[in-house]
Amino acid sequence: MSSNQGFLFNAPGGPYARIALDTPVRREFSYRIPPSFGSVEVGCRVRVPFGTRDLVGVVVGTDPHLPPDLDPRRIRDIRILLDETPLLTGALVRLARHIADTTFCSWGQALSAMMPAALRKDRPRRTIPTVEVISIPEGESLEELERKFPKQEKALAWLAKAGGPVGVREFCSRTGLSRSPLNTLAKKGWVRFDRRREFYDPFAGKASTPDTPPELTSQQKLCVDSICMGLDTREHADYLLYGITGSGKTEVYLRALERCLEQGRGAIILVPEIALTPQTVSRFRARCSEIAVLHSGLTDAERHDQWVALREGRLRVVVGARSALFAPVPDLGLIVVDEEHESSFRQESTPRYHARNVARERARLEGAVCVLGSATPSLESWVSANRGELKRLDLPERVAGGKLPPVQVVDMRVEKPDKKHWLVVSDPLRRAMEESFSRDEQAILFLNRRGFAPAWHCRACGETVKCKGCDIALTYHRWREKALCHFCMQEFPLPQSCPSCSEDISLVGVGTERAELTIQRMFPDIRIARMDRDTMVRRESYEELLADFGAGKYDILLGTQMVAKGLDFPNVTLVGVLDADTALHHPDFRAAERCFDLIAQVSGRAGRSSKGGQVVVQSWIPEHAAIRHAAHHDFIGFADVEMKERREFGYPPFSSIVRVLIENTDRNKAEAAAKKAADSLLDIQAPGVRLLGPAPPPVEKLKNRWRRQILVKADNHQALRPLMPTLYALSEKCAVIHD
Ligand code: ADP
Ligand code: ZN
Ligand code: ZN
C-alpha cells in the first residue's frame, strides 16, 4: 500500500483523457495528457500507444485525476494530438455512445464508423504540387533565356500571366510543356514549387439549373406547413410522411429544406444508395447550391473532402446514403430519411445500426426535425406513428390526379399446372408485353434473383448442390460457366452429377440471366437491358444504362431490385413482377413486409404519365396477404394484417429481439460456446424475457464456420434491461444483433 502511494506521489500528474479506440474491447482507455498539449477536448482525435501498436482514437472525456481503479504506473502518454479543435461535435460523440449501447459494439467502433476512412487512419490530407513565379529575370539573363531556352521562357511567361500558384499538372496540360523546364527554372531561383490542398468537387464543371418550384397541392401544403412549424420551434420533432409513389414527397422535402436553410441551419437528406442517382441529386441542387454528396462510389479522399467541407461550414447540406447520417453538418436543423422502410438503411456489419433509428436519435440530440418518408412505411414507423411518437402526414394521391396503375395477379398454378416449375412469362404477361411494344412503349420486368438458375436439384434423392463452405445452394452463372455461392462469392466448377447419389441433376428455378434468354427467344426483335450485380459492375454503368433506357434505346428493363426503386420513366406503361414470392421464402419475420414493399415499389414505376399503365404480378401463392394487398395498393390493409400477426407471434415492433450468434470452425466448439452463452443469460432474472435456443440458425454453416443461435425475445425494450450488461459483454466474443 505504502509503496503504491509512493508511486502515486512520484507519478506524473494529470490531467488524463479517456480515449475510445476502434477495438472490440468494450471500454475506454485512460492516457495522460502531456503538459505541452494544452487543453484536449472531447471529440479530438489522438494517436496513442496500445500494446505494441499505435492507434488513432477519439477523446470521449477528460479527468483531472486518474480514476481510482487504475494503476498510474501503467498509464501512458498520448503521443500526438491530431486535431486542435474537435473533429467530432459533442452531439456526435454522444450519438456514438447511443449506437454502442443499442447495437452492442464499443464506443470506439461506433466513432470509427462515423468518420471517413481517411480520418480514421489519420492519413495526411491530400495536396497537389503547385508552381509560381518568384522573380522575373532581367537584361542579359532574359535575353539568354529567349535565345537558348525557349521552353523555359514560355513557361515563365505563362506563369507570370497566371499571376499566382498553379497546379503543376494543370500547367503541363494547358501549356503542352513537360515538368523539366520548371525544374530548371526552380534551380535558377525564378519559380518555386509548393503544395496546396485541393478539394474534390463532385459537381466540377456541372452547372446546376435552378428550377421554378411548382405550386404545392393542398395536401402537400398541409405537410409542408406542419414540418415548417416544427422547424420554427427549433425543437426536436419526428414526422412520418406517408405518401404513395409519385405523390410529391420530394417536393415536401425541398420546401422543408428551404425553410431550414432560411433559418441558417444545415440538413441531412438520406436516400437508399441505389436511389442516389444524378437525377435525385440534381433535384436538390436545383434549389440549393451548398450540397455535399456522400455515397459508396467516392474514393476515400473524395469522401474526406466532402466531409471536411461540411465540418468547416463551406457546405451546409448533404445528400447521401446511410453513412451520410454521421456527416458533421453545422447547426443541424433537418434530417430526411427518404424510403425509410428500405432494408439498406440497416448496416449488416459492426456497428449494426439502423439509419432510421439513429436519425431519430441524432435529431433528438441536436434539436432537429426528422422526417421519415415512404409509400410503404416500415411497421416500426407505422406503429410508432399510431402510438403518437411520430406525427403522421399523408399524401394519399398522386400529383395532378395521376392514378396508381391497376395490378393483375396471375396465379401461376393455374397458368401451367403441370409444366416445369420455371415458367418465366405467363400468357397474360406475354399479351400485355405485346400490347406495350406495339404502341412503342416500354416495360420494366422485375426478378429478384441474379444468375441463370438458383439451384441444382437431384430428383432421385432430393439433394441440392451446396457451397463447400456454406450451407447455401449454388447458383448457376451462365456467362462465366460457373457455380457461384452468393454468400461467400466462391466459384466452383459445374457439378456433373449429384454429390450424394451420383444420379443426374437438373437446374431448377429462374434467375435474371435465364429470364433474359427466354424473353429474348419469345420476342426476338425486342431490345432487353439487363440490370443486376453481374452486369452493373461499375456505378457509371448503372447510370449509363438508365440513361439509355430513358432515351428509348431499349424496350425492356429487366433486373433485380435495382429496377424496383425510384425510377421515373414516363414511357414505361407495363411493369411485370416475374416471381412475386421470392422475398416470401426467406426465413425472416420481415419477409412478408419486404415482399409487399417490393411489389408496391416496382408497381409504382408504371403509369407515371398520361399514357397510363398496368402491372402484372406472377405468384404461386396469390392468396398471401402481402400479394393480395399489394395488388390493391393497400398499404393500410396490409399493415393491419401484419401488425396482428406480429403481435400474436411476439415479433417487433411488439417485442424486442436480440440474436446471439455463435460461430466456430469446429462444430462442437460452436455448440459448447453457445451453451455457455445461454447459461450466462439464463442466470439472470428478467421478467418478460424468453430465451430460445441455442439452436442452428436457418443457415447453419457459412464460410466454413458452424453457427448456433440464441434468441432473446423480450416483451419490450425495457424488459431487456437486466440482460444488457451480459449481452454487451457477450458481444466482445460473438455477434449480438438487435433486430
Ligand atoms: P414521390 O417522391 O412521392 O414519389 P415526387 O416528388 O418524385 O414523388 O413527385 C412526382 C412528380 O411530380 C415529380 O416529377 C415532381 O416534379 C412532380 N411534382 C411534385 N409536386 C408537384 C406539384 N405540386 N405540382 C406539379 N408537379 C409536382
Ligand atoms: Zn441425389
Ligand atoms: Zn459459400
Image (cartoon, rainbow, N blue to C red):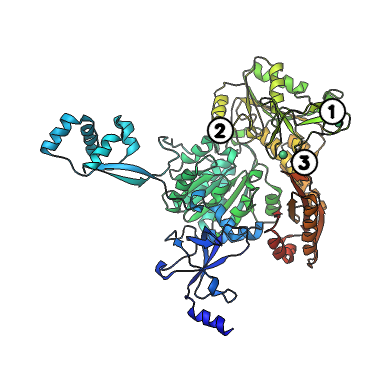
Dot 3 corresponds to which residue? 471
SS at mark 2 in the image: loop
Q: On the image, which quarter does residue 718 sit in?
A: bottom right
Dot 2 corresponds to which residue? 538
Dot 1 corresponds to which residue? 413
Question: Of 289 and 664, which appears nearest the observer?
Answer: 664
Residue located at (54% from left, 48% from top):
324
Task: Give the mark nearest the N terminus, 2 or 1.
Answer: 1
**Is 584 left, or right, of 205 in this rendering?**
right
Question: Of 133 and 620, which appears nearest the observer?
Answer: 133
Residue located at (14% from left, 37% from top):
141
On-image quarter of the N terminus: bottom right
Residue 65 seen from this side: yes
Mark 1 Cα-neighbour bin, 10 Å: few <14, some 14–19, many ≥20: some
Which residue appears farthest toward the left when viewing the image?
A: 139
Above or below residue 29? Residue 402 is: above
Amino acid marked by disc 2: Arg
Mark 2 Cα-neighbour bin, 10 Å: few <14, some 14–19, many ≥20: few
Q: Tell how many labels.
A: 3
Residue located at (70% from left, 54% from top):
737
